[in-house]
Structure formats: structure tokens, C-alpha cells
Amino acid sequence: MSFQRKQEKDYTKEVNDLAPEAEALAKGGKLSEAVDRISALEKQTRNASDMSSTASLLTLLVRLCWEQNDLDTLNAQIAIMSKKHGQLKEAVVRMVDEAIPYLDILEERGEKSKPKGGRWLELLHTLRDTTEGKIYLELQRARLTAQLAAYHESLAESAPKEDAAQREARKKNEAKGDEKVKKEPVTAEDHYNAAADLMSDIQIETYSSMDKREKTNFILEQMRLESLRGNWNKVRVGSRKINRVYLKDKDATDLKLRYYELIVHLALQEDNYLEVCNAYQAVWDTPEVKEDEARELGVIENIIMYVVLAPYSNEQSDMLHKLYADHKLEKAPLHYALLKCFVTKELMRWPGIEDLYGPELRKSPVFAPDTTLGVKTGPQADEERKPDRTVSPGDARWDALHSRVVEHNIRVIAAYYSRITLQRLTELLDLPALTTERTLCKLVTDKTVYARIDRPAGIVSFQRPRKTNETLNAWSTDISKMLSLVEKTSHLVSKEYAMHEAAQAGRKKVKA
């Protein structure tokens, strides 16, 4: 495609004269003759750089082929005209824009549901081939790609599932690098992969011609398709392309809720409960959610449960106390009471927690034994398929809650005890001795608490030993405080003596 030259001649009159003649020829069954006459004049307008006339001729050509239901000629002419030497860019854009709506009409006619997509898929491939590599057609190509990806996703619903042998063969091919070879999709996984690959090939974040809403929606579709095939690394990359400030607009509420739903699924794949909590807080900060009491209650419960499930850290502790200070969370009284237990520096006995909160919490999607929320897919699924990893996501999160309760109790004991026997610690935690020691070692490794275990004596020490300089500094500080108190006391005693003597002198003057 050459650089557009200055217009040398105006062919508007010739185009206006030719249009009714070409239409008459096409309606009379002489479409090929009409195409030839349009092509002859198109060459003159193109060589003269008459963009308006060239665009009119190309759109006329496409329209006549469509009206005569000659889709073979339509596909051929779109491909030929787009490759003409010195073809004008704007003319090609208008031709493609003229042909794109025909896809919807073909879909309404049922062409899309025919085997191999029928004429709908033929026209779609023709338009995608025409737009390939042309930056001035990037917007049209993105929209066409989205339609093709949706088509593959619809085929995946009826396609057979991938069995174990096919999965192993695919993994071997991927390891060898054979996945780059284009093959016809067969299984549902193949169609999902094809749809995700099509969408991921479009670097939509670099498109300046697309408005914010459409661009955000496109990225969300990329993330969703990658999540369907378990490629969570690409989902994470896609999440960083979203402008979260834009999601706060009232017009983007639906996009915001879709985005944070994907973030929740992404974080659950990584067991990042604190990120899940942050996502639900963003959802809660949505007027549409707060207007629905039942929906708001569910979000509040999720906020509390996931902040409690998150491993202890400075950020988690800070968020825990901030949420406890927000009395709006009292709309979920049972969950708020559980939150209060983690804020209060008191021991929580797991049997009591299990009896008090277990019946209600185990019914929720977070802790239900048969829940599908957070089921691992992709690389994580391979780990879950191992014989020693048969715990359901709900049971795994319930075990995590038990661990959080035990860790909280150890931090409370470390705050109130300087030394404690291992047997007494085991009794307070309601755990076997070996599990108690392992949990304590984990907290020490994570630097959450300081502890040293004297196994022969069976004593756990939570008191950190002081260095020589620290001991001297503490002794010096204590001496300084003591001398300060002695000086202050001496001053107060002297003050009392002076006041007593002044009072006696005043009485003597009165008597005199």
C-alpha cells in the first residue's frame, strides 16, 4: 500500500452516473459485467487518488454482491480490492465497514450454526485476512477476532472433553514445542485454546482508536478466556492492563463487577486470601451492591471470612482492625463475632469455635465440603490430581481457618507468657504435641513470634535473650528512672516542709 498522493482529478460525476447502471445490470443478472465496469472506473479513481470516489465504488461493489446473494464474488472482490497497488486506506476501511454488518445478517439466517460455520465463517475469515497487518484497520480486526473467539467458545460447549491420554499427548507436544503447529480444534479444550489464542494475539491496550469501555471489555474477555483454560499467569498480566480508576465510573459498574469476579477466582487459585478480601471490599464499595441487602450481606460475609483466612502479617492485622472498627459489618452478626475473636487478645478454643460457628459457616460456598469455588485449574490442577492432594477446596479452607485460630492462640500465649511447658501449650491449643511443635516452628520461621524449645526439659521460652549492650542500656535506663523518682520525691518532701513552716508562721501572726 503506497503513500497517499494528492488528488489529481474528481470522478464524482462519473461515479454517480455509473451507480444506477451497475445496479440495473446486477438486478438483471449481469453481476459480473457490473463488477467489471466498477473495477475499470475504480482503477482510474485510485490512480487519481480520488479517495471519496474510490470508497463509493468499493462500497457499491460490496453492496451489489451482497444484494445478489453472490457471496463467492463478495469474498473474492473484498480480497482483490484490498490488495490493489496504491489502494487508498480510507477506501478499504469503508469497504470493510460496509461488509461487517452482513455477518450479523448471516448469523440471523442460521449460517453460523451450520457445519464449519457455513458462509458466515467464510466471510469472517475473508475480512480478517483483509485487516491483517493493517494498523488503520486494527479496530475492525479486534471486533472480528472477538466474534471468531466467541464462535470457538460456542463450539466448545458441544465438543467432546479431553481425556487423560489426549491431555498427556498435548503436554508432550507442548514440551517439544509442537503447540505452534496450527491444528483443527477437536476437543472442547482445543476450542477454548483457539479462542484464547485469538484474543491474546490482539494487543488491545495499544489501540488508540477504541474507547475506554470497549477496550476494557475486550481485556476482560481476554482474562476470562485465559481463566477457562487455566492460564492464570496471563490472567494476572491482563489484570494489570485494566485502569481501576475508570472502573469507579458509574457507567462502568458492570465492568467493575466482572473484573473483581475474575480477580477473586485468580486469587483463590493462588490461595491469596488477602487479595480476595480487597476485591470484595471494592465490590462492596459499589452503589448497585449496597442497594441490594441480600447481595451486600453476602459480600460483607466474604470480606470477613477471607480477611480471617489470610495469614498473619502487618497488612492483614491492620485490615483486621480497620474492619472491626467499621460497624457497618455488624449486619452479619455471626461473622462479626468471629472477627472480634481474632481482634481480642484472648485464647480461642477450636472445639468451641467449631461448635459455635461451624454449622453456619460450613453451609457457605467458602467452607462447604462440596463447593467448586476455588477449584484449581491449569498447572495447579496437576498438583490437585495427586493422590495426597484429595482435599476439596472447602475442606482446605476450613483447615486453614483452624490454622489461623491456632496461630492466633500462639501469639496470645507469647504475649502473656515468658516461659511455658510444652505439655501445657499443647493443652491450650487443643493439638497433638507434634502438630503443636510444627506450628510453633512455622511461626518462628515466619518471624511472627520468637520462641525457643528446650526439648529435654519440655519448656518453650518466648523471652528473647538480651545482648550485653541491651542489658547495660536497660540497667542504665532503670537507674536513671530511679534517680529521677528519688529527686522528684525529695523535691515534693521539701515542698511540704516549706508549706508547713509557712502555715505555722501565719498562725503565730494571727495570735499576736
Image (tube, helix red, strand yellow):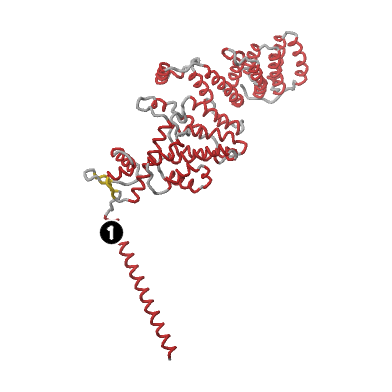
Left-right relation of 351 to 56? left
Q: Image quadrant of residue 313?
A: top left
* Most distant residue in the top direction: 29
Left-right relation of 4 to 360? right
Tell me how many marks there are.
Answer: 1
- Going 48% across and 39% down the picture, which residue do you hit? 277
Q: Which residue is mark 1?
A: 472
Residue 267 makes an appearance in the image: no
Q: Image quadrant of residue 317?
A: top left
Residue toward you, 463 or 476: 463
Residue toward you, 116 or 493: 493
Q: Position of residue 96 (x, y in %)?
A: 65, 21
Q: Image quadrant of residue 272?
A: top left
Which quadrant is the N terminus positioned in?
Answer: top right
Residue toward you, 397 or 208: 397
Residue 113 makes an appearance in the image: yes
Q: Amino acid at mark 1?
A: Leu
Residue toward you, 371 or 351: 351
* Most distant residue in the bottom direction: 512
Q: Position of residue 41 (x, y in %)?
A: 72, 15
Q: Position of residue 237 (x, y in %)?
A: 49, 32
Which quadrant is the C terminus positioned in?
Answer: bottom left
* Most distant residue in the left direction: 456
